[in-house]
Image (spheres, rainbow, N blue to C red):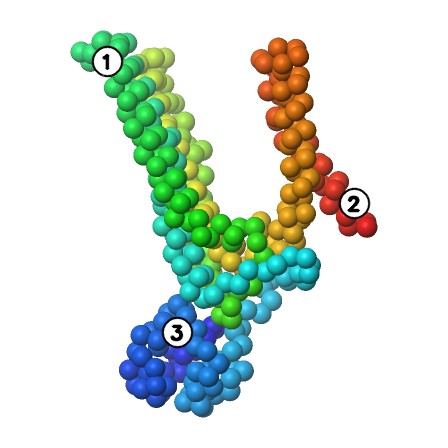
Amino acid sequence: MILADKIIELRKKNGWSQEDLAEKLDVSRQSISKWEGAQSIPDMNKILKLSEVFSVSTDYLLKDEIELDIPGEAPKVDTDSSFKEVPVSMEEANAFLAYKNQAASQIALGVLLCILSPTLLIALATLQESARIPLSEGKAVGIGVLFLFLLVGVGVALFIKSSIEGGRFHYMEKELLNTAYGVNGMVQEKKSRFQGTYTSQMILGIFLCIIAVSPIFVSMILYGEDDLHTALAVPFLLLFVGVGVFLIVRTNIIWDSMNMLLEQGDYRREKKMDEHKNETVGQIYWCLVTAIYLGYSFITRRWDISWIVWPVAGVGYGAVCGIVNSFRTKI
């Protein structure tokens, strides 16, 4: 139980309203509301007053059971003195989570629009080719392409908007965090409540992506090898994929935002420190790869095959980082 829940429980046990408690502590009712909503935390003077008013120890108020060791998660590693921790207050953590919830919907919608963008082009081109609509080929393609660029444009605009709005929080992903008292407990509680939603939406999203081909098979069953109906089933395939990806992207962004604050999963401290150490290696590596790609391409003029350098380099980069980290460990 976190501090916010303890304040609510103790206040109600004494039969006090938020106004009553605010009067006893000589603070505003809004302050009590923020404490109980885990939007801010009282300072130590107020903690002492709370312990007196509720007749409980400060240890009881300050020790969050939810912040004890969590099964399945490794404890935070000691921070190398060369790495600076960035402080994160309760207000900053709440603002970050609120932004991520909004950004999750925006980014997922942008991805959905990009996936759906060619649907009208496919439908109009198919219907025009079979003489089902009174449009010339140029008009059908023109309308479809216009619709495609419109949806992609809106999608990209959503990506840019989300990136700009979240500029102040970019450090959360890569920097080591020093969260204020109560932040970990508040985030862990939110994560526990979101666990069921995360699981169900991920399952539904993956399920929709798997059955996305069903419209094509249904078309083949009902109409045989009819190119018209098979082609018209493709927009429905894209719709299934789009909705599935929307659920997966939105859910993962929200889940990752909580992992960032807790420094769990892909945002573990040891992983962040390894990435910081590998920045110089990465800069040198990719400069060399670019030089090799351009040098080979200009000398041989085989641009048609030189692109293979990039996927090979991508795989090689992981191996190089692994070797470097292993060498550091031995040292």
As helix, strand or loop, the secondary structure at mark 2 comes to: helix
Looking at the picture, which amino acid does disc 3 mark?
Answer: Trp
Looking at the picture, which amino acid does disc 1 mark?
Answer: Lys
Horizontal side, residue 85 vs residue 212: left or right: right
Alpha carbon of mark 3 to alpha carbon of mark 2: how far?
A: 48 Å
Residue name at image x 34 percent, y 18 percent: 230
Looking at the picture, which amino acid does disc 2 mark?
Answer: Phe
Q: Position of residue 219 (x, y in %)?
A: 33, 21
List the residue tagged with mark 1.
139
How packed mark 1 is, by other alpha carbons closer than 10 Å (few <14, some 14-19, many 20 or more), is some
Horizontal side, residue 40 vs residue 309: left or right: left
Alpha carbon of mark 3 to alpha carbon of mark 1: how far?
A: 61 Å
Give above or below for 282 relative to 293: below
Alpha carbon of mark 1 to alpha carbon of mark 2: how far?
A: 62 Å
Horizontal side, residue 301 vs residue 112: left or right: right
The disc placed on residue 327 is 2
As helix, strand or loop, the secondary structure at mark 3 comes to: helix
How packed mark 3 is, by other alpha carbons closer than 10 Å (few <14, some 14-19, many 20 or more), is some
List the residue tagged with mark 3.
35
Q: Position of residue 35 (x, y in %)?
A: 39, 74
